[in-house]
Image: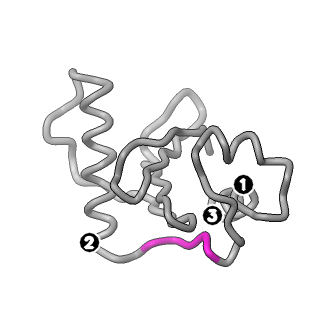
Amino acid sequence: MLLDLQQVADTGNTEYTVLRSKLHAPATPAAQVVLVSDDSACTRARQALDSLIHATNPNAANPLPQRALYVIKIGSITAVNDPNGRAGEYSPIVFFNPQWSFLGNMLGY
């Protein structure tokens, strides 16, 4: 997933220009697309994702159970993936701006 997001964000990769625009993601050198392991950032990512889940699915458990997430920083924005959250055979990757407002999503593996 990290390698895929590095390709999407890569400033030299024009193949993903439309997707970057849709996601409001900045063109970012691959070296600035990194896995986040900071506990406070991961907690904030979980809160933002849970808030989005509750806003779009009022029947979701409240609170949602604690779970491991992938949190990836792409320049100034953050991508969050719940590997257990599925959309068919895919797993959504949700993008948030620096204020943790929803920007868009894409399906990953």
In the rendered image, residue 76, in percent from the top left (x then y), is placed at: 50, 65
Residue hosting label 2: 40
- Quarter of the picture containing the N terminus is bottom right
Instruction: Look at discs 3 and 1 and give the one toward the viewer.
Output: 1
Instruction: Look at discs 3 and 2 and give the one toward the viewer.
Output: 2
Question: Which of these two is toward me, 89 or 16?
Answer: 16
Q: Is residue 40 above or below residue 22?
A: below
For image coordinates 29% across by 24% down, the residue present is 57
Q: Look at label 2 and name its amino acid.
A: Ser
Q: CA distance from mark 3 to mark 1?
A: 10 Å
Q: Are marks 3 and 1 in contact (CB under 8 Å)?
A: no
Question: Which of these two is toward me, 95 or 69?
Answer: 95
Residue hosting label 1: 8
Label located before the other in sequence (2 or 1): 1
Q: Are marks 3 and 2 in contact (CB under 8 Å)?
A: no
In the rendered image, residue 89, in percent from the top left (x then y), is placed at: 60, 32
Neighbour tally class for label 3: few under 14, some 14-19, many 20 plus, Cα within 10 Å: some
Residue hosting label 3: 2
Colouring chosen for the image of the structure: one colour
For image coordinates 29% across by 74% down, the residue present is 39
Neighbour tally class for label 1: few under 14, some 14-19, many 20 plus, Cα within 10 Å: many
Q: Which residues are magenta?
A: 32-36
Which disc is residue 82 wearing?
Answer: none
Q: Main secondary structure of the magenta part?
A: strand
Quarter-wise, where is residue 5 in the image? bottom right
Relative placement, left or right, of 64 versus 13 is left
Residue 34 included in the magenta stretch of the image: yes
